Image (cartoon, rainbow, N blue to C red):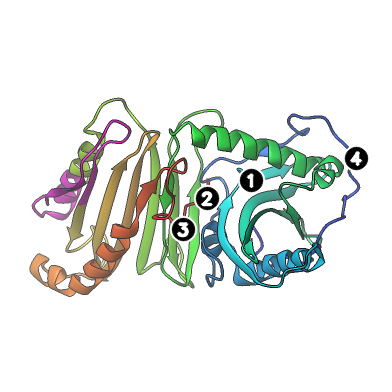
């Protein structure tokens, strides 16, 4: 799991003992897949976009300080700085030789006295030797020449920009509740478009003992429409059999178009989960994206009772779950990402 605090922070100039390298993969590298690394929600949002949703407040502050230091040394100097956007620039990169080191790259955009500037923010996670490097994206190729991991991250970032500009990739907005922590995560097999998943619970709880759960899954998209409806209707049928309740409706939220299929929502209620003394209520949304089916649910555990009592007791929880689910959506990074202030790490 990625450390929540960086042990040491540097501005630029640390080569970590590396030498200039040719393009292409690093020996023994692992380019991470969605769901392979636990996504840690931010403890406080200090900046907009990806970093504000998935980096600790201390790390956000340090990056802003580094940008301010670069701006103060520029000609002309500037001290009026506003971060306007942050995004995950590339998938994370893990070196395995000679030691295991985890790298991540973000692209931050800041307004410096009325002029927009882009910055590469490179996180290097290593036990007792973590570092943060901030460089101006358009000018500092020297740092990438010195550091093969940064050079490789920039290559992966260029590949991602190409994929996103083609229009077939989507960001998934997942604005998790405060004090939420990762519980489990699972990536698709390497080189295969298999399923991936991630579960989140309140701070202090676990995947076995929880009162609330946020679960997100990605499933390979099958050509044509109807996959999302079939998934939700199948979940309703399974819950009806297990909990001896009628299957509930699957409600359309958004119609499909040429690029994306439909978006649907349903509510699952089980008055008493078999073998337990608790009930469950879950609000679930299924989104047919151009690349995957996204299945997102927010679930509450409640005292067991008859179906009417459980529905009455869960009204407030369902309203909270509905408000969360309504903010979960896809954005096309090639056009407009304003509706996705908390894009799930990819």
Magenta stretch holds residue 242? yes
Which of these two is toward me, 185 or 107? Answer: 107
Q: What element carries label 1?
A: loop
In the rendered structure, the answer to whether residue 276 lies left or right of residue 169 reads: left
- Name above or below for residue 312 compared with residue 139: below
In the rendered structure, the answer to whether residue 132 lies left or right of residue 268 reads: right
Q: Distance between the residues labelled 1 and 4?
A: 21 Å
Residue 96 image-quadrant placement: top right
Q: Name the residue tied to disc 1.
A: 92
Q: Which of marks 3 and 2 is in front?
A: 3
Disc 2 to disc 1: CB gap under 8 Å: yes
- Give the label on residue 75, or none: none
The count of marks equals 4
Q: Is mark 3 on a helix, strand or loop?
A: loop
Q: Please provide percent x and percent y for residue 254.
A: 22, 46
Q: How far apart are marks 2 and 1 (CA)?
A: 9 Å
Q: How far apart are marks 1 and 3 (CA)?
A: 17 Å
Q: Nearer the viewer, mark 1 or mark 3?
A: 3
Quarter occupied by the N terminus? bottom right
Q: Name the residue tied to disc 2.
A: 345
Q: Distance between the residues labelled 4 and 3?
A: 36 Å
Local crowd at mark 1 within 10 Å, few (<14), some, or many (≥20)?
many
Q: Please provide percent x and percent y for residue 72.
A: 78, 69
Q: Give the range drawn in magenta.
A: 236-265
Q: Name the residue tied to disc 3.
A: 342
Q: What element carries label 4?
A: loop
- Name above or below for residue 28 compared with residue 122: above
Disc 3 to disc 2: CB gap under 8 Å: no
Give the mark nearer the N terminus: 1 vs 4: 4
């Amino acid at each position: 799991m990625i450390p929540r605090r960086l042990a040491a922070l540097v501005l630029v100039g640390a080569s970590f003992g590396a030498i200039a390298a040719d393009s292409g993969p690093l020996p023994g590298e692992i380019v991470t897949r969605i769901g392979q690394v636990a996504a840690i929600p931010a403890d406080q949002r200090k900046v907009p976009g990806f970093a504000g949703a998935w980096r600790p407040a201390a790390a956000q502050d340090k990056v802003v300080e580094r940008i301010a230091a670069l701006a103060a040394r520029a000609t002309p100097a500037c001290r009026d700085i506003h971060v306007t956007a942050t995004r995950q620039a590339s998938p994370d990169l893990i070196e395995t030789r000679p030691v295991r080191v985890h790298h991540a790259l973000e692209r931050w955009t800041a307004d410096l006295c009325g002029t927009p500037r882009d910055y590469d923010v490179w996180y290097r996670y290593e036990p007792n030797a973590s570092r943060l490097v901030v460089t101006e994206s358009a000018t500092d190729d020297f740092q990438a020449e010195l550091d093969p991991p940064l050079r490789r991250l920039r290559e992966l970032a260029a590949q991602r920009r190409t994929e996103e500009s083609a229009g077939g990739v989507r960001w998934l907005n997942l604005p998790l509740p405060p004090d939420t922590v990762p519980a489990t995560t699972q990536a698709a097999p390497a080189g295969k478009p298999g399923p991936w998943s991630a579960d989140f619970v309140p701070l202090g709880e676990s995947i076995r003992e929880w009162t609330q759960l946020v679960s997100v899954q990605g499933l390979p998209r099958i050509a044509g429409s109807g996959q999302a409806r079939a998934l939700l209707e199948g979940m309703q049928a399974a819950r009806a059999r297990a909990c001896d309740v009628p299957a509930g409706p699957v409600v359309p939220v958004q119609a499909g178009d040429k690029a994306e299929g439909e978006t649907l929502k349903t509510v699952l209620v089980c008055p008493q989960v078999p073998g337990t003394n608790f009930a469950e209520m879950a609000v679930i949304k299924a989104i047919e994206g151009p690349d995957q089916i996204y299945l997102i649910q927010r679930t509450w555990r409640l005292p067991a009772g008859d179906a009417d009592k459980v529905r009455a007791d869960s009204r407030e929880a369902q309203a909270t779950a509905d408000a969360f689910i309504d903010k979960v959506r896809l954005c096309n990074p090639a056009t407009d990402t304003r509706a996705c202030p908390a894009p799930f790490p990819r």
